[in-house]
Image: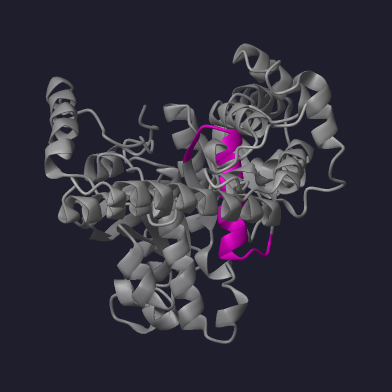
Amino acid sequence: MEEKSRSNPDGRIPPQDIIAEKSLLGAILLSDTIFPDILETIQAKDFYDNRHSLIFAGMTSLYSHHRPIDLLTLTSELKALKTLKEVGGAPYLTELTNFVPTASHAKAYAELVEKASVRRKLIKAGINITEKAYNESTEVTELIGQAEKDLFEVSDKTTKNDYSSLEDLLGDAFDRMENLHKNKGALRGLKTGFRDLDKKTAGFQKGDLIIIGARPAMGKTTFAENLAYNVATINNKAVLFFSMEMAKNEIVDRIISDVSGVENWHIRTGNISDEEFSKIGDALGEMSEVPLLLDDTSSMTILELRNKARRAAHDHDIGMVIVDYLQLIQGSDRYAGNRVQEVTEISRGLKILARELEVPVIALAQLSRNVTGRDDPRPVLSDIRESGSIEQDADIVMFLHRPDYYNQNKDDYVETHITELIMAKHRHGSIGKIELYFHPELLRFMSLDKTHDE
């Protein structure tokens, strides 16, 4: 059952590539992980064969509902959409899966489909312009305006106008203000589990890039783990944690210590009492329900990281992304040898990821050694390695500082376990200092009342 030819008025068949269309759909059915990338290139209306357009629409519906795309799910979805018979039924879908041996060339197939689609749109726009030009009753200025409109519609996919008028935005703004007015004190962003930090930020906001910098031994990885677990638990949103320095199992052990209240050293050495083992069992039951996703790939480019995050967002309701840490990410080959350009690309890529997924992205950052030689060792913005682009792209920059670490050799030293969270940049609010209590045996940061803020 082949699609009938749709010829132009002059009898010529419009540009199309049916083989590329079938190859693309077959490739997606073989591996749906490529679908987010394909969606950036084409839409259902770009297919010439109407069956293929309906099949791609079914795939898009599955993707939007965070469901896998395969032969079984697509058959079910098209049946629900009442288009299964129109596309040729399950036999035609099976034919598509057998049409290509691998999904590796899917992007190339998509580009062929897109090029043919653009050519058809240009032909259609040209025909419309020609017909209107023959109509002498139409004013030339009106004709030119309509011609521009038709051509802009063709290029709309590659050159989108994403601006909105103030009038359109005011309605949304009023709804936000009304909701805040009705729910005084409610946070606009994700709760972090740290009371004073939530007050300072109104919660972590969608699309924000948040940098947390510290020298080694300040506890930045521990703080990030606490944040990840708190956000996933309190907000019931999945948190994607890229740990490029520490293995998954080690992170899990540290979180178990935090949740169970069993000292991390006991867990690491296996020196666990019966009572502690019981506590660990209870903690594991609680943790099994927490939507925390861990990736411990030790070496990634910013492009690979963004693709992984995009695919995770397809499968899960991602609320936040954490990267430990920024300087371990690689830039693209074109900036090899130029670390400043690499870091610029990386920080920009993280900000774009936050905007694209509409979630806060937290990136840990290593500070330069300059801090150790100053009278006041508290970090400042210039201490971030290759700080220019990072500081520019970040919406919030925070530093972890433990006075105990720098005072321990003084004669009058008394350990406080206080860690200062210094907000050095806050694009949407005030800067300042927040004090947290750090429990080293449990690897847990807490508000100063020594309880997790619920």
The x and y percentages for residue 18 are 72, 44
Image label count = 0
Instruction: Assess whether residue 299 is covered by the magenta stretch.
Output: yes
Please identify the quarter of the rendering in which residue 30 is found: top right
Q: Nearer the viewer, residue 212 or 406?
A: 212
Q: Is residue 164 left or right of residue 390?
A: left
Please give the name of the residue rendered at 41% of the width and 55% of the height, measured from the top-left corner: 155
Quarter of the picture holding the C terminus: top left
The x and y percentages for residue 329 are 57, 67
Picture colour scheme: one colour
Instruction: Assess whether residue 184 is covered by the magenta stretch.
Output: no
Q: Is residue 177 above or below residue 332?
A: above
Please give the name of the residue rendered at 77% of the width and 22% of the height, measured from the top-left corner: 72
Q: Nearer the viewer, residue 199 or 413?
A: 199
The x and y percentages for residue 446 are 40, 41
Q: Main secondary structure of the magenta part?
A: helix
Quarter of the picture holding the N terminus: top right
Q: Nearer the viewer, residue 418 or 244?
A: 244
The magenta-colored residue range is: 298-319
The x and y percentages for residue 31 are 75, 41
**Residue 337 shows up from this direction:** yes
Q: Is residue 208 above or below residue 303?
A: above
**Residue 208 shows up from this direction:** no
Q: Is residue 262 above or below residue 217?
A: above
Please identify the quarter of the rendering in which residue 198 is found: top left
Q: Nearer the viewer, residue 224 or 131?
A: 131
Q: Is residue 218 left or right of residue 10?
A: left
